[in-house]
Image: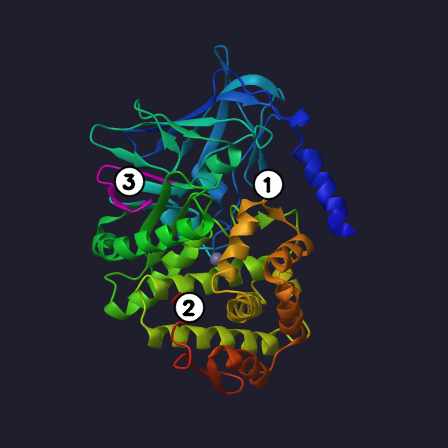
Amino acid sequence: MRSLLFSISAALVASPALAQACPDTPARHTLAWTGDGDIAVTYTGPAPSGVFDIAHSVAADEETTTDTFIVDPEVVVFDAVATMDRRGQGSWALPGGPADSVTIRYKILPDHNDAVWPIGKEEIAYAFDGGFYAAASRVLLADYAYDDCPIEVVFDLPEGWTAAAPWTRDDDGVFTAADLDRFHDNGFALGPALDVRPAGGMTLVYERAAADWAADAAPGAADAFTAYETIFGDSPAANFHVFLFEGTRPDGGAFLDSFAMRQPLPARPIDAVVWRHGFAHEALHTWIGNAISRADDSDIEWFTEGFTDYLAIKTLYRTGQIDQQTLEEKLGNLLRRYTLGTFLSQGVKVTEAGANKQQNRLLVYGGGAVIAFLLDAETADAMAPGTFEAALRALYDADDRAYSQDRLIAALDASTHGAASDVIAAVDAGLRPTDLADRLAPHGVAVASFPPEEFYVDLAANPAFLAR
Ligand SMILES: [Zn+2]
C-alpha cells in the first residue's frame, strides 16, 4: 500500500499540468576567476521560492562546512544591493521573498583542500594545478523550485584557461544543463592547464599528476562504456565526463553525467585491478542508479549497487581487462562479501539493508551482487545466455524508470519467468556457503569454501560463462 501511495504522489509531481513555464531567457550562472584567486559568481534568473541552496556537507573537524567557502551572497535590485539572509545548512533567502527575476552575486573561495571531507573531496571541491574542480551542488547556489528548465553556465576565465563539464556546450562556449538535476548533480573543472582526453564515449579530465593513470585508463574505460551502450541501446549521458585526482586512498563518487575518482599516485601496476573496477562500476551507474532509479524512498540499493558491481565485473572480463583467474577471484569476493554481510548484519534482509547502507554495506553490495550472479547463471541455462542483460534493458526501456522495489522485482520477473523473485527470496532468507555452491554447481560454477571468509570459484567446467 505504501508503495502505491508513493507512486500516486510521484505521478502528480510528474504531471505535465504542473510543469513550469520556462522563461524566454534561461537562468544563467557566470563564473569568473578573479585576480585574487576566488571565483565570482553572478546568477541571473527566476527565484520562484526565494531561497537558494547548496548541498550541505560537514568536514572532519565538524566546524568547517561547504558554507564556509561561500562569501555571503548579495542580491542586486536596480542599483541597490542587499545581503541575503544566511539560514545555515547551505541555505540563503532573498530578503524580499520570491521574484520573477533576480541578480545574485557571491564568491566561492576555492580553499576546500584546507579541510578533510569524510565523503571524499571528489564529492565536494578540490583545487589543483592552479585551477579548481567542484561538484556543482556544493558550490553553486540554486533555487530548488526552479527545477524543470534549462540552466546556462558561462565561464569568464583568464586567457588560455579552459573549462570542462558534462553539460552541452555551444560554439560560443555557453554550457547548458537540461534542468536543475543535471546542473547540480555533476562535476565541473576549470584551470590554466586542464588536461582533457577523450576515451570513447567519455571525456577524462585530470590533474597533471594523474596523466599516466589517465593514459592507462582510457582504452579500457572506453571499451566498458561501449559495452554498456550495447546492452542498454544508448547512453543517457550525451557528454559523459570522468574527473581523476590524486588521493590518499582509492575512492569515487558518481553524478548524473559524470563521476570522479581518486587514488594514490603514481599508480602501481597492481592498482589497476582496483581502479579498472572503479571505472566500470561508476560508469555503469549512468544507467543503473541514475537512469534506472528508485521511486521516492523505496529501497533498491541492493539492485543499484549489487547489480552494478556484478555487471561491472562481467564487463571487465568480456572486454579483456581482467583474466579468468581474476574473474574467479572477484566472483569469490562477491560470495565472501555476502556471507560476511549476513554475519555482520544479522537478521537484516538484503532487500531492507539499504535503509542503513553504510552499516549494512557488505550485505547491500554482496547480497545484491549474489542475486545478480545467481539470476544470470540460472537464466542463462534455463532460458538463454543474455537473459540477464535483456532484463536490465527492459528496465531501461520502460517509460517510467523510477522503480519501487515491488515494481522492480515484478519487472525482473517478467523478463525471467519469475526467476528473480525466487532468487531474491532465497538470498533474503540467507544462503549458507554450501547452499551457494549447490545452486551454482549445475551451471558449471564450482565453489569451495571454508566459512565464513574463504571462497574459491572455478569456472573450468563452464569457461564460456560470463564470456558470452
Ligand atoms: Zn556504486
Residue 21 percent across, percent down from the top left: 59, 20
Is 407 positioned to the left or the right of 113 in the image? right
Which residue is identified by label 2? Answer: 466
Q: Nearer the viewer, mark 3 or mark 1?
A: 1
Main SS category, magenta section: strand
Q: Residue at x 46, y 46 (%)?
A: 255
Earlier-in-chain disc, 3 versus 1: 3
Which residue is identified by label 1? Answer: 399
Is 227 positioned to the left or the right of 374 in the image? left
Can residue 116 be seen?
no
Do the CB atoms of the residues marked 3 and 2 lie less than 8 Å apart? no
Amino acid type of the residue that numbered disc 2 sits on in the rendered structure: Leu
Secondary structure of residue under mark 1: loop
Residue 180 percent across, percent down from the top left: 52, 33
Question: Residue lying furthest right in this view?
Answer: 1
Secondary structure of residue under mark 3: strand
Amino acid type of the residue that numbered disc 3 sits on in the rendered structure: Gly
Which residue is identified by label 3? Answer: 131
Disc 3 CB within 8 Å of nearest ligand 1 atom: no
Amino acid type of the residue that numbered disc 1 sits on in the rendered structure: Asp
From which residue to which does the magenta span run?
A: 188-202
